[in-house]
Amino acid sequence: MGPSARLLDYIPKNAKRLGRYLLNPSIPEGKVAETELSYVYIDFVASLAAISGVIAALKYLLPDYLEINPVSLINWHIFVLMLITNAVFFSLILYALLAIPLLIKERKCHSKIYYQSIKAFAIENILVAVMVTVAINRIIVKGNFKSTTGSLDLWMGSISAIASLFLLVWLIAIPLSAYMRQYYKRSIAYAFGFSAVVVVAIVNPAIASKYFSRIIDSKEFCSQYVSYRFKEELADCTYNKECLIGKCLAEKDKFIEP
């Protein structure tokens, strides 16, 4: 066994399954229990566990870009609950929309639609975490999440947003459209598949500005905000940090709320 083959042995099974799925996201034939879709919840939880590591890696790999310590800024229990809720709601709504035309053709449970969507969010959630990190960094540096902090920030935000949209198409819209082709003509099948994903993405977006006030730890946010915005004043003792933090907490909505 060569070095590269031995290296693959150290890659977790979850990562291997998600890697295969990313390369070939087509919905497998047969019952769910007989395919890798049966591991969907295990892979989803594993991806959630990896998110904090991904965010920490951003700070380590791009120290000159991030002015924040993102890991300590996030209310992890709320953030994880948000990711789970979003993935489940997205998948259930998508299933409900596509089940109607499918049941007309064949009366059976088309649960693969739901499982396919949940598995897609095991990967999609990692990009959501990156976009949240970018947004929080912008809030602290620029005062809002829409203004970029520089060219690197523009690239980071644009690439993660485009990648997120691409994954919705590659992992959900195209495979579900192909699944619909078992029952409808190609044009109709793809119209159903893409339209359903677009509708659900609008109704239940993976990331929205309203989430920030719940995701961010207010006290830690104000501490990092004050440390960044009043660095020089704090260094020469012009201002008292605790007083500034208290003022920030009293007015935090104007920083965090869109």
Image (spheres, grey):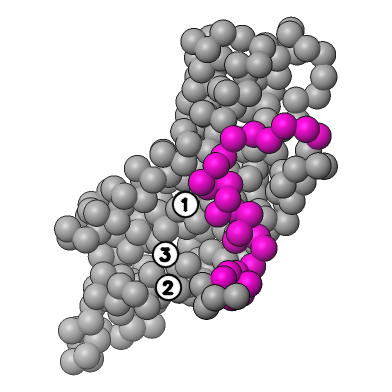
Query: Tag 1, which secondary structure?
Result: helix
Cα separation between marks 2 and 3: 32 Å
Q: Is residue 245 above or below residue 34?
A: below
For image coordinates 68% across by 27% down, the residue present is 95
Residue under label 2: 57
Q: Tag 3: Cα neighbours inside 10 Å, few (<14), some, or many (≥20)?
A: few
Residue 15 image position (x, y, % from top left): 60, 61
Magenta residues span: 5-31
Residue 120 image position (x, y, % from top left): 58, 43
For image coordinates 57% across by 23% down, the residue present is 178
Q: Which residue is situated farthest in the bottom direction here?
A: 236
Q: Which residue is situated farthest in the front direction here?
A: 1
Instruction: First in sequence, mark 2 or 1: give its number.
Output: 2
Query: Tag 2, which secondary structure?
Result: helix
Image side of residue 202 versus residue 247, left or right: right
Q: Amino acid at mark 1?
A: Val
Residue 250 is marked as: 3
Residue 128 is marked as: 1
Q: Nearer the viewer, residue 181 or 193?
A: 181
